[in-house]
Amino acid sequence: MLELPIPGRAPLRVAHLVLDYNGTLALDGNLLPGVSDRLTALASRVGVHVVTADTFGLAAVQLGSLPVTLQIIGAGDQAKAKLDLVESLGPAGVVAIGNGANDRLMLERAALGICIIGAEGGATATLLASDVAVRGPTEAFDLLLHPGRLAATLRI
């Protein structure tokens, strides 16, 4: 469990991290530098769930040695599938991180939504639905691993 104190708000008690894959953790299907180490560190404290359409077909190989649960979703309402995962975990205990239009609903519903604006960009609607925007996944993970950074951004 992660406890994230934010001045002026009730502390967030996080049990799960829900992540998009392409554009969030990976570029062109390959994990970005620094992601593996931080995912492993976070997985010792929270459940880590990666939910993806797996555009490049590399998610299982790239994540195979990491302590994460991978859910590959097919065509159809991918936004709803991601939202359903957050709902099933209890949104009050979830941090969701993504960048695409199909990540908007999960970021909006989670206790904390973080939008990645990396090499693929970030969908405007997803950005507006998030609590925080960062340039890459390592910055997002570092907000959780070093909660003072998150507090400095979200304090009221």
Image (spheres, helix red, strand yellow):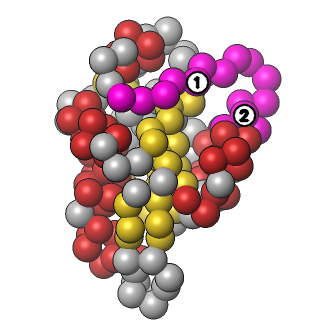
Quarter in which the N terminus is drawn: bottom left
Distance between the Cα atoms at labels 2 and 1? 10 Å
- Residue at the spot x=47%, y=70% of the render? 12
Q: Alpha-carbon neighbours of circle 2 within 10 Å: few (<14), some, or many (≥20)? A: many
Whether residue 145 sits left or right of residue 81 in the image: it is left
Whether residue 15 sits left or right of residue 129 in the image: it is left
- Secondary structure beneath dot 2 equals helix
Q: Alpha-carbon neighbours of circle 1 within 10 Å: few (<14), some, or many (≥20)? A: some
Name the amino acid type tagged 1. Gln
- Residue at the spot x=48%, y=54% of the render? 15
The part of the image, by quadrant, that contains residue 72 is top right
Name the amino acid type tagged 2. Ala
Q: Are marks 2 and 1 in contact (CB under 8 Å)?
A: yes
What segment is highlighted magenta in the picture?
Answer: 67-83
Q: Is residue 116 above or below residue 35?
A: below
Nearest to the observer: residue 19 or residue 5 = 5
Residue 132 lies in the magenta-colored region: no
Whether residue 70 sits left or right of residue 39 in the image: it is right
Residue position for label 1: 71
Q: Is residue 102 above or below residue 15?
A: above
User: Where's residue 61, x and y in %?
Assistant: 38, 10
User: Where's residue 53, x and y in %?
Assistant: 60, 21
User: Where's residue 66, x and y in %?
Assistant: 32, 25
Nearest to the observer: residue 20 or residue 123 = 20
Residue position for label 2: 81
